[in-house]
Image: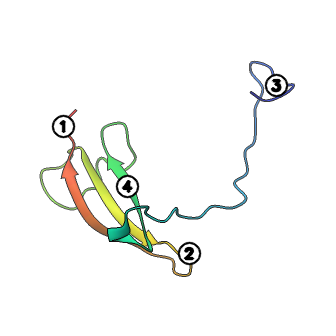
Amino acid sequence: HVCGAEPGDVLEVQILDIWPRPSANPAFAGKSFGSNAAAWWGFHYKDLLTEPKPREVVTIYEVDATGERNWARAVYNFTWTP
């Protein structure tokens, strides 16, 4: 809900700050994880590195939980079965 907005209005959203959420699992203390889906409805569907292409794949990435470094490392992926 946006106060005063009406159907057809254009809204601008600015993200002012963002940071990764550390894992709550004690086995992964200090780490954060994210994912990227490469599916027929996603951006990376035709940009996969290995055959068969295209296919639906979900990749899990480890990111720096402290925000001190700018990196993401792929740690696991699996073929998505709709």
Callout 3, which amino acid?
Answer: Ala
Callout 2, which amino acid?
Answer: Gly
**Crowd rating for badge 2 (residues with CA inside 10 Å; few <14, some 14–19, many 20+):** few
Which corner quadrant holds the C terminus? top left
Q: Which of marks 4 and 1 is nearer the N terminus?
A: 4
Is disc 2 in contact with disc 1, using a CB cutoff of under 8 Å? no
Q: Which mark is residue 34?
A: none
Q: Which residue lies furthest to the front in this view?
A: 26
Callout 1, which amino acid?
Answer: Thr
Residue ID for mark 2? 67
Q: Earlier in the sequence, mark 2 or mark 1?
A: 2
**Crowd rating for badge 3 (residues with CA inside 10 Å; few <14, some 14–19, many 20+):** few
Task: Tell me how far mark 2 sits from mark 1, CA to CA.
Answer: 33 Å
Q: Which mark is residue 5?
A: 3
Task: Tell me how far mark 2 sits from mark 3, CA to CA.
Answer: 35 Å
- Give how far across and how far down residue 54 sits, in percent: 21, 46
Q: Earlier in the sequence, mark 4 or mark 3?
A: 3
Against 72, is 36 above or below?
A: above
Which tag is nearer the camera, tag 4 or tag 3? 4
Q: Residue 81 carries which label?
A: 1
